[in-house]
Amino acid sequence: MKKTLLAEFTAREGTRDEVARLIGDYALKVRQEEGNITFDVYTKAAHPRSFWIFEVYRDEDAFQAHLNAPYGGPFNAALAPLIEEDASVLTFLSAVAVRP
């Protein structure tokens, strides 16, 4: 079963461009992971310091491999002082079956 989540965080005032650069570099690495299906980065149109990352992994094992990737820790360490939250806020999602 696919593992789908939304990661959210808010760049501190004056750090938006640095956060965008960091997440852009990180996205390039994550998208190369064998089990990654989607890693799309967004900002809220009305609040451009609010970042939303929509992530989909092949399954739980692929998600765990993502969590254990060697570049994740350094990314999170660099991101932490640049965002308002203590860390990314993760919301795990479940698909809803929609009939045609």
Image (spheres, rainbow, N blue to C red):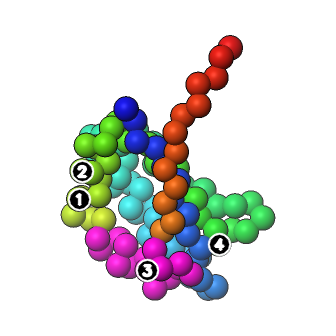
Span highlighted in magenta in the image: 73-87
Mainly helix, strand or loop, the magenta region?
helix
The amino acid on which the numbered mark 1 sits, given as a three-letter code, is Asn
Q: Is residue 40 visible?
A: no
Q: Is residue 96 visible?
A: yes
Q: Earlier in the sequence, mark 2 or mark 3?
A: 2
Horizontal and vertical percent position of residue 7:
51, 59
41 or 21: nearer the eye? 41
Residue at 74 percent across and 60 percent down: it is: 45
For the residues labelled 2 and 1, the Cα–Cα distance comes to 5 Å
Mark drawn on residue 20: none
Mark drawn on residue 65: 2
Mark drawn on residue 80: 3
Residue at 38 percent across and 61 percent down: it is: 26
> Is 82 covered by the magenta stretch?
yes
Q: Earlier in the sequence, mark 3 or mark 1?
A: 1
Badge 1 local density, few (<14 within 10 Å), some, or many (20+)? few
Q: Please tell me whether mark 2 sits on a helix, a strand or a loop.
A: helix
The amino acid on which the numbered mark 2 sits, given as a three-letter code, is Ala
Q: Please tell me whether mark 1 sits on a helix, a strand or a loop.
A: loop
Q: Please tell me whether mark 3 sits on a helix, a strand or a loop.
A: helix
From the viewer's perspective, tell me whether residue 9 is left or right of residue 37: right
Mark 2 in CB contact with mark 1 (< 8 angstroms): yes
For the residues carrying marks 4 and 2, which lies nearer the camera in this image? 2
Badge 4 local density, few (<14 within 10 Å), some, or many (20+)? many
In this figure, which residue is indicated by the disc labeled 4? 49
For the residues labelled 4 and 2, the Cα–Cα distance comes to 29 Å
Horizontal and vertical percent position of residue 64:
27, 51
For the residues labelled 3 and 1, the Cα–Cα distance comes to 18 Å
Q: Earlier in the sequence, mark 4 or mark 2?
A: 4
From the viewer's perspective, tell me whether residue 79 is left or right of residue 52: left
Residue at 38 percent across and 79 percent down: it is: 78
